[in-house]
């Protein structure tokens, strides 16, 4: 079920470094180098696959830009919040 703007803003209070923009929740992660970024992306990929919920992302050298949205719902859902929490735990 698609979350309201208020629900999204409330959830983002628990998600440092995430923002709501253009219908997505987004973050940029800066790693030590390309190897660290690629390793983190691999760990995120396994978790995303387990959730059957996949990020929109790109990587340039040590930076990973991630955008989450549940396309079937046309907005942000609990799946996006759950994956963002997982990503935060993996990057810690």
Image (spheres, rainbow, N blue to C red):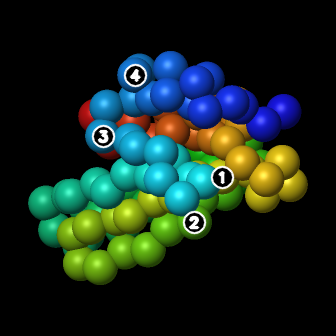
Secondary structure beneath dot 2 equals strand
Which of 89 and 69 lies nearest the eye of the viewer? 69
The CA distance from mark 2 to mark 3 is: 17 Å
Q: Earlier in the sequence, mark 4 or mark 2?
A: 4
Residue that label 3 marks: 17
The reply to whether discs 4 and 2 touch (Cβ–Cβ < 8 Å) is: no
Residue that label 2 marks: 56
Residue that label 4 marks: 13
Q: How many tags in the picture?
A: 4
The CA distance from mark 3 to mark 1 is: 16 Å
Q: Earlier in the sequence, mark 1 or mark 4?
A: 4
The answer to whether residue 21 is left or right of residue 4 is: left
The CA distance from mark 2 to mark 1 is: 8 Å
On residue 48, the disc is none
Task: Give coordinates of residue 31: x percent, y percent.
Answer: 20, 58
Residue, far front: 5
Quadrant into which the N terminus falls:
top right
**What residue do we see at 61% from left, 33% from top?**
5
The CA distance from mark 1 to mark 4 is: 18 Å
Binning the other alpha carbons within 10 Å of mark 1 as few (below 14), some (14 to 19) or many (20 upward) gives many
Which of 74 and 80 lies nearest the eye of the viewer? 74
The reply to whether discs 2 and 1 touch (Cβ–Cβ < 8 Å) is: yes
Residue, far bottom: 60
Task: Give coordinates of residue 16: x percent, y percent.
Answer: 31, 31
The answer to whether residue 47 is left or right of residue 74 is: left
On residue 69, the disc is 1
The answer to which image quadrant residue 7 occupies is top right
Residue, far left: 32
């Amino acid at each position: 079920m698609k979350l309201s703007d208020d629900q999204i803003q409330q959830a983002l209070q628990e998600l440092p470094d995430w923002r709501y923009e253009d219908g997505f929740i987004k973050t940029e992660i800066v790693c030590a180098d390309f190897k660290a970024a690629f390793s983190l992306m691999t760990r995120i990929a396994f978790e995303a696959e387990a959730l059957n919920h996949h990020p929109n992302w790109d990587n340039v050298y040590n930076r990973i830009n991630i955008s989450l949205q549940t396309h079937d719902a046309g907005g942000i859902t609990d799946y996006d919040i759950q994956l963002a929490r997982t990503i935060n735990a993996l990057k810690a």
